[in-house]
Image: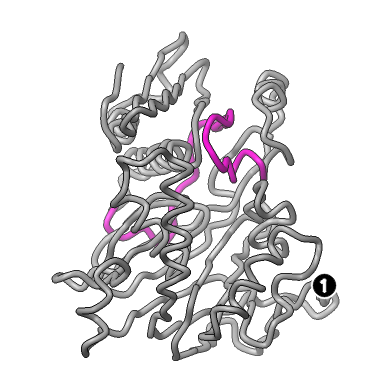
Amino acid sequence: TVTEYEGHALSVLKECELQAFDGIALLYLLLDVQALYVVVRAFLFCNRVVCVGGDGSVSEVAHGLLLKAQIDAGKDTDYVSMPVRAPVPLGVIPAGTTNILAHTLYGIKHAVTATLHIIMGHIQPVDVCTFSTPSKLLRFGFSAMFGFGARTLALAEKHRWMPSNQRKDFAFIKTLADLKPEECELSFLPLRIPQEDSRENDGITLLYLGSKDQWHKIEGHFLNVSIMAIPCLCSMAPRGLAPNTRLNNGSMALIVVQNTSRTEFIKHLKRYASVKNQFSFPFVETYTVQEVKVQPRLKSGPDVKENRYLNAASAEENYPWNIDGDLMKEASEVHVRVHPQLINLYG
């Protein structure tokens, strides 16, 4: 099958009978980015799936596998509180720009290393998040950003006529120049960890609760909110965007950057590329959580009209989300849950 648009791989996987494959099927995903053509190959062989591509393609294939598993299990795909695991393992061979998932799995962006792990059958279970609104499941994924990280992606998507690296650099600089916080309410359910297993590391806040269902709430203006179930290693963040979480420890890292000056925010961003702790700033809060709800506050006033590039709230009041490098827009509350070891990945 030759796919020619974003989401085609998902529709193909939803129709596949994965357990029926005993030969080889080839799936080619062709993304046209002006002069840049990215060919993403995914193939199914002996009840396994391997995706050769970037983070967006890998995330789409993982979402397709898990969504197909829910359909086959007779689950309501609009409300998946306890999803079933993916029936086949997924292999990831990096062929994109950042390759966060591959870098996290193998510790390096190297196609040969990834291929050897797949050939040798090195499998490890990995935690996956569900992103839902009150009325529907948005998607399965590994990480998300709301605020600066999402606005940067939204602006980059508006300039797809530019070469990939130039587009990303332009969007980053423009978003940073027009830096504005998001007003929202964050509700989160902290992970309940036994006291003897606790360790103080890199400023992560572990909350020990008497009740496992005690929700915490934060309201205010935030420059960025990151929710990550995996460490998210990449060349720009060798320690990871969320270095205190693991691939399969059943938790998410909630990283909240409060409103601050542009200078201080840039200092925080620069720390990701160094060995220093990027969270040791008074305006950065970090938590280890099981669930998060993000409720944006609708904006009003002259600033909304003036900021035509970065105003995420459109006429329909949709706010951008960066989920595994894919842009999604949603107006209502987004509920993020972590589901331990929901998919097996080669690595």
On screen, residue 60 versus residue 116, left or right, reads left
Question: Which quarter of the rendering shows the C terminus?
Answer: top right
Q: Which residue is drawn at the image coordinates 41% and 64% (left, top)?
A: 174
Residue 279 screen position, x and y as percent: 70, 75
Q: Which residue is mark 1?
A: 197
- Considering every residue shown, the one lying at the far left of the view is 315
- Magenta span main SS: loop
Q: Is residue 98 above or below residue 129?
A: above
Look at label 1 and name its amino acid: Asp
| Residue 149: in magenta span | no
Element under label 1? helix
Residue 312 screen position, x and y as percent: 29, 69
Q: Which residues are magenta?
A: 77-104
On screen, residue 129 versus residue 305, left or right, reads right
Question: Which quarter of the rendering shows the N terminus?
Answer: top left
- The quarter of the displayed image where residue 205 is located: bottom right
Please say which color scheme the image uses: one colour
Q: Nearer the viewer, residue 40 or 152?
A: 152
Q: Is residue 66 above or below residue 154?
A: above
Residue 177 screen position, x and y as percent: 45, 71
- The quarter of the displayed image where residue 240 is located: bottom right
Q: Nearer the viewer, residue 36 or 190?
A: 36
Q: Which residue is drawn at the image coordinates 67% and 87% (left, top)?
A: 282
Count of marks, rendered view: 1
| Residue 101: in magenta span | yes
Q: Is residue 126 above or below residue 322?
A: above
Q: Which residue is drawn at the image coordinates 48% and 37% (left, top)?
A: 58
10 Å neighbourhood of mark 1: few (<14), some, or many (≥20)?
Answer: few
Q: Which residue is drawn at the image coordinates 58% and 56% (left, top)?
A: 340
- Considering every residue shown, the one lying at the far top of the view is 23
